[in-house]
Image (tube, rainbow, N blue to C red):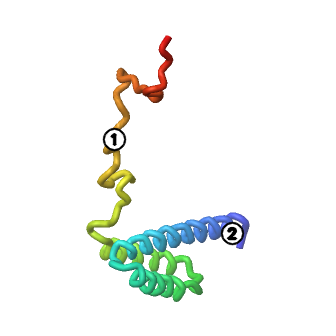
Amino acid sequence: MSGASTAAYLARRAAQKERVRILYRRALKDTLNWAVHRHLFYQDACDLREKFEANKHVEDLDTIDKMIDEGEATYNKWRHPDPYIVPWAPGGSKFSRNPVPPSGIEIAYDYGREDND
């Protein structure tokens, strides 16, 4: 392999590793949405990890790309329709519930301790 093709190979492998990492994290978080109890989640998480580990030995770049595309399609097909969102996160039920007061309103943080001057 020449220097340019080696660099291209390494760049493609790095991109594939990143895609696999992102897919695994998304699938793992989505597994938590489907699990009713934590002990059910642990078993599903182990099964998911085994699916990823089973293909760890594959070296052909085109095969890896095909497997990643199939995994992303499967993830999108089985994604939870109503995922759990932390209440205070964007999209949660408590997000921006208490907005910042308008700029013309002055807040007295030392209420009851004012100087009587």
Quadrant assignment for the N terminus: bottom right
Q: Which mark is residue 6?
A: 2
Q: Which residue is mark 1?
A: 98
Q: Position of 107 compared to 54: left or right?
A: left
What residue do we see at 32% from left, 53% from top? 91
Q: Nearer the viewer, residue 16 or 46?
A: 46
**Number of numbered tags placed on the structure image:** 2
Q: Are marks 1 and 2 in contact (CB under 8 Å)?
A: no
- Locate residue 3, reporting x and y percent: 73, 66
Going by the numbered disc 1, the residue's amino acid type is Asn
Q: Quadrant of residue 72?
A: bottom left
Going by the numbered disc 2, the residue's amino acid type is Thr
Mark closest to the chain's N terminus, 1 or 2: 2
Q: Quadrant of residue 100?
A: top left
What residue do we see at 33% from left, 55% from top? 92
What residue do we see at 44% from left, 74% from top? 28
Q: Is residue 103 above or below residue 20?
A: above
- Locate residue 54, reporting x and y percent: 52, 88
Q: Which mark is residue 19?
A: none
Q: Mark 1: few, some, or many residues within 10 Å (few <14, many ≥20)?
A: few
